[in-house]
Image (cartoon, helix red, strand yellow):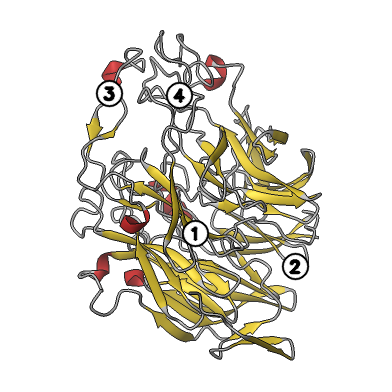
Amino acid sequence: MRRMLVFLCVAAVCMVGSGSLFAAAAPQWPQWGHDPQHGSMVANLGQPLNRILQDIVYDPFVPAEISAGGGDLLVHYQVPMLDGNDVYMEFKGGNFNTTSHWETQDWLEKKLTWQGGNLVVAWSYTSTWKPVPYASQTSGNGPFWEPVFHPALSGDFVYVPSAQGQVVKLRKSDGSVAATINPFTGSSAPTGSTDIFVASPLSADKSGNVYYNAIKLSHSQPWDQDVVDSWLVKISPQDQASKVSFSVLTPGAPSGTDTTCKVQFADSQLPWPPTPDAVPGTTQCGSQRPGINVAPAIAPNGTIYTVSRGHFVTRYSYLIAINPNLTLKWAASLRDRLNDGCGVLLPIGGPGGCQVGAHLGVDPGTNEPGPGRVLDDSTASPTVAPDGSVVIGTYTRYNWDQGHLMKFSSTGQFQGAYPFGWDVTPGIYAHDATYSIVLKDNHYSDSGSYCDVEAYCPADRTATHPNYPEAYFITQLNPSMGIEWQWQNTNPLSCSRDSSGNVTCVNDHPNGFEFCVNVMAIAGDGTVFANSEDGNMYAVRQGGTIRDHIFQQLALGAAYTPAAIASDGKIISQNAGHLYVLGN
């Protein structure tokens, strides 16, 4: 039975029965996706993008990170969190070592406040948090891109990820530690807790509970041995922690030692599927555990949503609904949901096409209906729509790495998909007694249609498939996942700004730039604010027309740079390790 909390509001301050204080005015942008449902919409309007009002460097390692990433900035960054006059943002310290990758860095949370027209540092806190260990790009398991460090605001406090699966609760007023919450103490604590990681952004519900995913990995072989355990953790406003293992939340999943999980055909068997009835090989599944970077979402009725995957396989994943007392409500498999592969999004025969004779709609990699896959380099997290349905971005390789946005009812029934979902937490534009779903929609090139062998999957998508070419959109969908409108970024200019503010450009992207945003920012009139890899922040009106845009620092392949909308309409943005304030 849920414990009821009694609130007493006096002089514009609400007091919980335990004595914790909560400000009466909710923060403007307190967490990933803005709110517990991750809708990413605010009531106020966004200012015109006329000027850069502030430029603050928060990641001094960007040049080294770009070099280590082969010219791309493969780092996930925190959404700027906004509360009245204050901005909370991650900063990085320590050092960046190209051998150990991210382990030698430090993550700081700083409170910036407006004074005399400038953002100044009010306090700084250095966390002991470290990301899960680095995994090679070819391992297929674990992250190759730097995971996200992401606190949450709740009441008068900032909850910050810490080492050993813990969370530190800071006072907003001065950054002092109000509590350190350790869910892994006592007789139930697993041994070797230094290998437990906070593996997701923190999410806070309307009652002040904080949720996150945690994972315990093998110390010597974190990605080559099965996961030791993993949990959804809940912290109450009174600092009480409870948790439930993902093994309890996925009772129908293959066991960790099961060796029947299917993997894609070998390159030597291209084009795929090798025969119309070919059956792929199998491998050990590994235990179900959270996808790295998946922020739990919380519905208005208290249901918590998160996502799991097999430790060794990406094609065996689940969307999980959990009751407020951390008991399982339902778990819906993401397998065998998609029927838009061969002969639908992909031709049968010819360059980049499936093997002649392939069955209609199958994923050529396994010759089965396509699954929504969960990759550890993604930050895609569930979004709860106003009707209680849930949308989640997933990965699929067979449509040029675009993935699919999948939609489920509040009781776990699959309701459909849209053929883009890679690394995006979709936003919700609520309007006219209904709602729309907003997402980036990148039609990538340079990766081939479904494989990485040029002879069978040519990298030049536009030349090979001119009817489905490289292109980059902001797309709005109706509740049935049909397109309402799209806006395409066709800017071909790759630009940079020098230390004197001078901008120089090269015309080298004839098909435009992809959008480097994983969480949306939607104003009250439906205007969508999104960063692009061309270095611009764009404001796109309802109907799919550009309102305005502004160039920031650098055209750069980046993963990813989300923005937030302040109560006065300023846009808090980021590009190339710089925090920008944009507006009039």
Nearer the camera: disc 1 or disc 3: 1
Nearer mark to the viewer, of 1 and 4? 1
Along the horizontal axis of the image, is 555 left or right of 107? Answer: right
Q: Residue at x 50, y 68 (%)?
A: 151
Residue type (three-letter) at the residue carrying disc 4: Gly
Instruction: Characterize the local packing of mark 2: few (<14), some (14-19) or many (20 or more) Cα atoms within 10 angstroms.
Output: some
Mark 2 or mark 1, which is nearer the start of the sequence?
1
The residue under label 3 is 266
Give the labeled residue for mark 4: 448
- Badge 3 local density, few (<14 within 10 Å), some, or many (20+)? few
Question: Is label 1 in contact with label 3 (beta carbons under 8 Å)?
Answer: no
Q: Is residue 509 left or right of residue 304?
A: right
Q: Residue 14 at x, y = what percent?
A: 66, 85
Left of 511 or right of it: where is 368?
left
**Marks 2,3: beta carbons within 8 A:** no
Which residue is denoted by mark 2 in the rendering? 567
Answer above or below: position of 49 versus 508: below
Tell me which numbered mark, 4 or 2, is placed earlier along the sequence: 4
Mark 1 or mark 4: whose residue is earlier in sequence: 1
Query: What amino acid is labelled 2 in the image?
Result: Ser
Q: CA distance from mark 1 to mark 3?
A: 35 Å
What residue sits 36% from the left and 47% below the top?
Answer: 309
Which residue in the structure is indicated by mark 1?
296
Distance from Cα at disc 1 to Cα at disc 4? 33 Å
Amino acid at the residue labelled 3: Ala
Q: CA distance from mark 2 to mark 3?
A: 53 Å
Determine if residue 527 is in view. Answer: no
Q: Where does the image place residue 332, in percent across and percent down from the top left?
A: 44, 45
Regarding residue 80, the answer to whether it shows in the image is yes
Residue 208 relative to residue 224: left or right: right
Say whether disc 2 or disc 3 marks the residue closer to the N-terminus: 3
Q: Nearer the viewer, residue 508 or 538?
A: 538
